[in-house]
Image (spheres, helix red, strand yellow):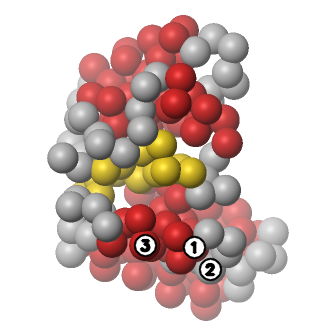
Amino acid sequence: MSAYIDTSALAKCYIREPRSLDVLDWADAQDEVVTSPLTLVEFRCVLARRRRAQQIDLPLERVALAEFDRDVQANSWRIQQDAPSLFLEARQLIDLVPELPLRALDALHLAYARHFGASSFATADKHQAEAAKALGLPVAIFY
């Protein structure tokens, strides 16, 4: 069974920050780590946002993106195939946890993890972790 990693946890594998080594250890302990196609766009946005905020410089942004792209090509992170029904499922998840501030892309990540039967859900996002727990997913938290 595959474990699922969302972008907030995956970014820690390429940009050293608190809990980076924990995420890498978690990923190494999994049989397979999957993510959604959303991560391809979100990770690029994370790098650009951090560069604009001067948290990383342009050379680090380029290196991190190249390493990520290489790892995706090598299937270190297996990108799940897109499933149109997951958008409806993500919409329904928002109704399943109405008391939690579940954002659109977070709901889509959770829908992917549930749809593909993830054995674990890794995140560095507190609200997403709470939603994953409320939805019955085993959560690996890295914040």
Above-or-below relation of 45 to 70 = above
Binning the other alpha carbons within 10 Å of mark 2 as few (below 14), some (14 to 19) or many (20 upward) gives few
Binning the other alpha carbons within 10 Å of mark 1 as few (below 14), some (14 to 19) or many (20 upward) gives some
Which residue sits at x=71%, y=85%? 57
**Label 1 is placed on what type of residue?**
Ser
Which residue sits at x=46%, y=23%? 135
**Label 2 is placed on what type of residue?**
Arg
Q: Earlier in the sequence, mark 1 or mark 3?
A: 1
Q: Are marks 1 and 3 in contact (CB under 8 Å)?
A: no
Above-or-below relation of 31 to 76 = above
What secondary structure is marked by label 2?
A: loop
Distance in Å between CA atoms under marks 1 and 3: 9 Å
**Label 3 is placed on what type of residue?**
Asp
The reply to whether residue 8 is in sight is no
- Residue 75 lies, in percent from the top left, at 21, 68
What secondary structure is marked by label 1?
A: helix
Q: How many numbered markers are drawn?
A: 3
Which residue sits at x=70%, y=63%? 49
Task: Out of 40 and 27, give the one closest to the viewer.
Answer: 27
- Residue 48 lies, in percent from the top left, at 64, 67
The numbered mark at residue 25 is 3
Distance in Å between CA atoms under marks 2 and 1: 6 Å
The residue that disc 1 covers is: 20
- Residue 90 lies, in percent from the top left, at 43, 22
- Residue 140 lies, in percent from the top left, at 49, 50
The numbered mark at residue 16 is 2
Taking the view exactly as shown, the residue that stands out farthest to the bottom is: 59
Distance in Å between CA atoms under marks 3 and 2: 14 Å
Q: Are marks 2 and 1 in contact (CB under 8 Å)?
A: yes
